Image (cartoon, grey):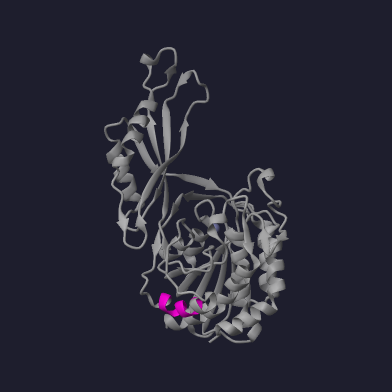
Amino acid sequence: MLNFSEAKALTRQHCDNLVDFARRIVATPSLSGEEGDVAAIICAELKLLAYDDVWTDAVGNIVGKINGGSGPSVMLNGHMDVVDPGPSDGWPHPAYSGEIVDGHLWGRGSVDMKGPVAAMIYGAACFKKLGAQPAGDIFMTVAVSEEIGGLGSEFLMRDFSADCAIVGEPSNNQLRIGHRGRIELQVKFKGRSAHASAPHLGTNPHFAAAKFLQKLDQLPLAEDTILGSATIAPTLYETDQVSSNVIPSEAIVFLDWRNVPSETPDHAIAELKKLAADCGECEVSVTRQMRKTYPGPSQDFASIFPPFSTPSDHALVAAVTPIIAEATGQPVTPDVWNFATDGGHIHAAGIPVIGIGPGDDALAHTNQERIAIADLELGSAIYGPMIGAMMEAVT
Ligand SMILES: [Zn+2]
């Protein structure tokens, strides 16, 4: 089995290539649905690193496979899309420059999560560099459209299997064992449109929506021993009118429900219907949208990120704990991410998931996004030994 000091030495040896690859993908814009250019660079790197098989699927997800023995397989998962960098004047270094300043790689996606993707790709490639066959197959998966709810991984997991998985979202190289899910819902209040000068001729849906929002704090929200308490937040508000002198016939409240495993989408809809029952006529649904993908076909996608949690006494947690402790020089305390990841889609397919990745997640989606090269290198060195230990743990 690959031990940490071997992996560390190998990663040191190839660190310049790792950093150069991370820079090139950070410098290549890849908003959700527009990942074609970055996908080409990632596929080329997987081939260069001698992955045995590299392919993309219908929505543009990449899979790089390293052939192993007949033992359990391990899936690694990251995403190649990024959120919009916003106004350019807020960035100390341009969002797509890939500049390295004071030991940090700057730019959109450096933390979330092109840096971690580069770390995983190089981490798994240690087996190839050593000429050591892993006990089972390794699947490096790089998904599209995670930032809009995980369309890529949801699609991938319809037809993909592995015995266990690592999600490499940033965690400062600390172990993560779960997160709450996210369900985007809309409550559409129905009214009757009229000229705003004669409100008595219409039914104004704003009042029903206002009554509903006032009651939202009465909504029962579940508590989970690992993931903590569910939350709900109203986010957007829309009407079917653009003129300010017309009473609309619809008012739509958008809600962001961070759910725990006991709260399914059907449960969320039923609870919201109950709460809205005396507010006015309304419809409650999960937001669905047609989303474009870079290979061409658009996909009808429901905005649902499932939650996941892996018990802290799970065999996978026990197997990777000594490796992470050795690498970081600190005791390992399994914790949860505050945000949702593609780990939910993988867990929903019945695969046990744990998470770890280099980079400070507090910098994700900000104009201060940067990753320390030292974290990147350390994170990359952890993956190879983890893969080996996980294959033994699920045998
Ligand atoms: Zn991410």
Say if residue 145 shows up in the picture. no
Q: Could you tell me which quadrant the C terminus lies in?
A: bottom left
Please state the total of marks drawn on the protein image. 0
Q: Nearer the viewer, residue 104 or 43?
A: 104
Task: Name which residue lies at 64% across and 77% down.
Answer: 11
**In screen coordinates, is 142 left or right of 19?**
left
Q: If the picture is divided into quarters, which one holds ligand 1? A: bottom right
Q: Nearer the viewer, residue 385 or 81?
A: 385
Stretch in magenta: 317-324
Q: Where on the picture, by quarter, is residue 348?
A: bottom left
Task: Name which residue lies at 57% across and 51% down.
Answer: 365
Say if residue 345 shows up in the picture. yes
**In screen coordinates, is 244 left or right of 127?**
left
Residue 39 in the image: state x and y as whole percent: 65, 61
Check residue 300 for magenta coloring. Answer: no
Q: Where on the picture, by quarter, is residue 371?
A: bottom right
Residue 223 in the image: state x and y as whole percent: 31, 55
Task: Name which residue lies at 71% across and 58% down.
Answer: 98
Task: Name which residue lies at 47% across and 29% down.
Answer: 240
Magenta highlight: main SS:
helix
Q: Nearer the viewer, residue 37 or 365?
A: 365
Q: Nearer the viewer, residue 38 or 318?
A: 318
Residue 105 in the image: state x and y as whole percent: 67, 61
Tell me: residue 332, above or below residue 277: below
**In screen coordinates, is 360 left or right of 231?**
right
Check residue 322 for magenta coloring. Answer: yes
